Image: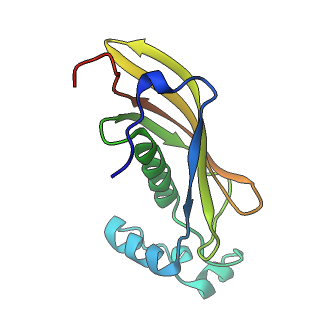
Amino acid sequence: MAEQVYWEDVSEGTEMPPLVKNPTTRQLVQYAGSSGDFYEIHYDKDFAQGTGLDGVIIHGALKNAFLGEFATTWMGPQGVLKRLSCQYRGMDQPGSPISAKGSVTKKYEQDGQHLVDCNIWLENQEAQKTTPGSATVALPSRKSPA
């Protein structure tokens, strides 16, 4: 079970522990089956190369899901993911690790909730940010009853 992060324990600039993902072509095939996105660039190397790509690439929506996993793992079981967004700025390929990273950019209270905005992203082995994004999470407060 993930450790709980409390609102009082974070501040602007707090770094979120990285999450390393090691996507495989098999995972892309499984994701295609569950999402219904069967575009061949995500599992057929010859087809992908025929379109001018170096090889198979990871689904954008799967990369968004990796960022969602990153944010929800960090916030812990009592946190609530309020908003998640990302942009696809680079292609990632299976067989190469990608790292989810982030930091807290704003901490505030609104409508009785203890909110934290985070700058999050996926980066490849060359430290290139291929999928920048942001998230807002509601964290529990040590001062509020559960």
From where the camera sits, is residue 37 visible?
yes
- Residue depicted at 56% across the width and 23% down the height: 11
Residue furthest out toward the bottom: 46
Residue 53: quadrant of the picture: bottom right
From where the camera sits, is residue 87 visible?
no
- Residue depicted at 51% across the width and 64% down the height: 59
Q: Is residue 123 left or right of residue 23?
A: right
Question: Where's residue 24, x and y in %?
Answer: 52, 77
- Residue depicted at 65% across the width and 62% down the height: 91
Q: Is residue 70 above or below residue 28?
A: above
- Residue depicted at 56% across the width and 21% down the height: 106
Q: Is residue 89 above or below residue 4?
A: below
41 or 71: nearer the eye? 71
Q: Quadrant of the C terminus?
A: top left
Residue furthest out toward the right: 126
Question: Where's residue 47, x and y in %?
Answer: 59, 83
145 or 126: nearer the eye? 145
Q: Is residue 115 above or below residue 124?
A: above
Question: Where's residue 27, x and y in %?
Answer: 45, 75
